[in-house]
Amino acid sequence: MAVTRLEVHSIRPFAGGVVFGDTGPYRQIDGIVHLAVDPNHPANEVITDIKLAPRDAAGRVHCSADFTILQPEDTTRGSHRIVFDVVNRGNPTILTNLNSAGQRLGAGNGFLMRHGYTVAWCGWQYDVPPNTPGLVKAYVPEALNSDGSSISGRIAIGFQPHAVNHTHTLADRLHKPHPAADINEADATLVVREYQDGPAEVIPRDRWTFARLDGEEVVADSRSVYLAAGFQPGKVYEITYTTTGAEVVGMGMLAPRDLVSFLRYGSSEAGNPCAGEIEHAFTFGRSQSGGFLRRFLYCGLTQDEEDRPVFEGLIPLVAGSGRGEMNQRFGQPSTPARPSAGRSFPFHDTLQTDPDSGRTDGLLARLDAAGKTPRILLTNTSAEYWSGHASLIHTTMDGNADLEPSENVRIYQYAGTQHGPGQLNLFDVDVREGPKGQQLDNSVDYRLLLRAALKNVERWAIDGVEPPASRHPRLDDGTAVPAPELEATFRSIPGVNFPEVLKHVHRADYGPEAHNGLVQPAPSSHEPYPNFVPAVDADGNEVTGIRLPDLTVPLATYAGWNLRHPDSGAPGQIMPQIGSTIPFPATREEREATGDPRPSIEERYASKEDFLNEVRQAAQVLIDARYMLAEDLDTVTEQAAQRYDALSTKRAPVAADDD
């Protein structure tokens, strides 16, 4: 077995020892899992550069990862099922998503615990921000040349500032940078664009340097880039240079596989705290972590070294068509920048042929060929469609037809939602990154749909009960449309502008070995792939996907996009991941005063109770269709009541800045 040791650092009560229904209290186990794998084993050969890593006397390659396990104090009272949380940039997310917890390690509503799941997570990402308490990390070896020296190669780093600054690290946000091999490299280039995939303007080499500001002083630094004129908000920058030092990025994917395999099949004598208790395993990953799961599936890693099933069901959330740079030399698992080999062919779960390279491939090609494909729910919000890539998972690459998923896949779009679950308190600042949008952030909370998704994939994998049908925009019924078709609807709403630049994934050549993780950086972009977004009604609300009562009994227009505020630069561009809440006029008087074409709240609903009755009826439709759990009916009603109180009061109109 690949796990050589489970090094336990602490065991303590979870959530202060609170009792979760019939399951009882939980305990939290923290430590480090140690792994050793044969790089020549067929289950491991897919990992890029694993054969270039140092080996022990037995020919094995070692790595380790931080881990946490939450399990019932009395394991016999659990469900004998484990849910693995793929951490996002070192942060656990399953409790904030499935349990609706306000803190990443909070119990929230206790959903997972009340249902008896063991919950686990471990590090997989080698470059999470260093010296940051609480982050979960993987520790992987460095790939080396045959003479033992470090590997060098070209790399590209992209970024879009929200404010003027002079220095940017050679990484995404605060992650571990890829240092420049030579701070005086003449062939290093820095380009700037007005928007992603726009024409590139080269910034002369003598106007920037590998350096950082230390107070007033410019200090040479191989991990930062300095521009004397300043990086401007809203503009897109990309620096291409030579770096040295290539960690085996993909080994991080083996830690989740082998930890969960150990928890399922390992013995108590080997130190397994779950020995004999875990019968089934599922996994969930959101955003970057959803991309991890798509890469995990592409690499065929849902079986362990002994060809036993590890995960029987997977829920990649808000990954769109991306797979991330999780198995790539010099990979940047956190980069949101495009172009990236993490957003390239193949997109669909079944086989397609790339018209540019002639290569035939599919997301599940390895697993399908082996007959070992698990059950998969691909779940996305409206934001991934407006980000230019989600429709590629269910349309042909030429945009002429719909593609049906394979028998082991369902595709769900959560209508009128943004990348992260909406907040009940309406605000206009992205708490993750800081910039303001032109509209209030999207407030639709889709987390209750995730709870139903977990129960559905569980029943599918264990009992063979098929989940509800896929729901997403389609070409054949006119619910998937080019974004420009919606411009008139949105511009008719007072104070609402429309994107001047629409996002797409562009065809790009990353080199002949890109599919094996050896990527040529900063390729020239070619024609964009077609992209489609969900069609909307006269209110601007989406007519397709899984529509919560927010959409079917609305108080506002809920969009999966929001434009950057002029203070953050590029006000004609879409903010990354953030959607909009555009409240209806509260009264007829307000509607007439502003010229809003959308009927007011008082014209739609006779009273608050009338509104809530409609909400309960709409929620029951979702419950009957199994897109929502009966236990969440009260949650939906309470949230609707809060929104009604917040939005039904007459407001002074505030116009957005003009284009």
Image (cartoon, rainbow, N blue to C red):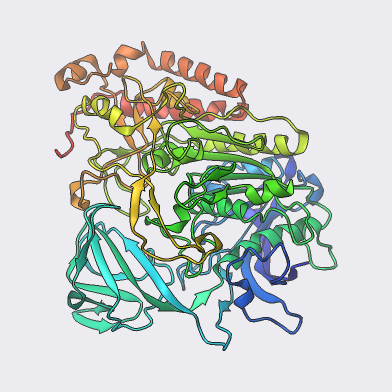
Could you say which is closer to the camera, residue 590 or residue 348? 348
State the image quarter where residue 3 is shown. bottom right
Residue at x 32%, y 25% (from the top left corner): 540
Could you say which is closer to the camera, residue 120 or residue 225? 225
468, above or below 424, in the image: above
Question: Where does residue 167 sit, x and y in percent of width and height?
Answer: 26, 71
Question: Where does residue 298 sit, x and y in percent of width and height?
Answer: 60, 52
Is 340 on the left-hand or right-hand side of 42? left
State the image quarter where residue 657 is shown. top left
Is 309 on the left-hand or right-hand side of 586? right
Question: Where does residue 326 sit, x and y in percent of width and height?
Answer: 53, 61
State the image quarter where residue 257 is shown. bottom right
Question: Where does residue 229 sit, x and y in percent of width and height?
Answer: 15, 69
Q: Name the residue furthest front.
A: 358
Residue at x 58%, y 63% (from the top left corner): 124
Could you say which is closer to the camera, residue 225 or residue 76? 225
Image quarter where the C terminus lies is top left
127, above or below 116, in the image: below
Could you say which is closer to the camera, residue 498 or residue 477? 477
Image quarter where the N terminus lies is bottom right
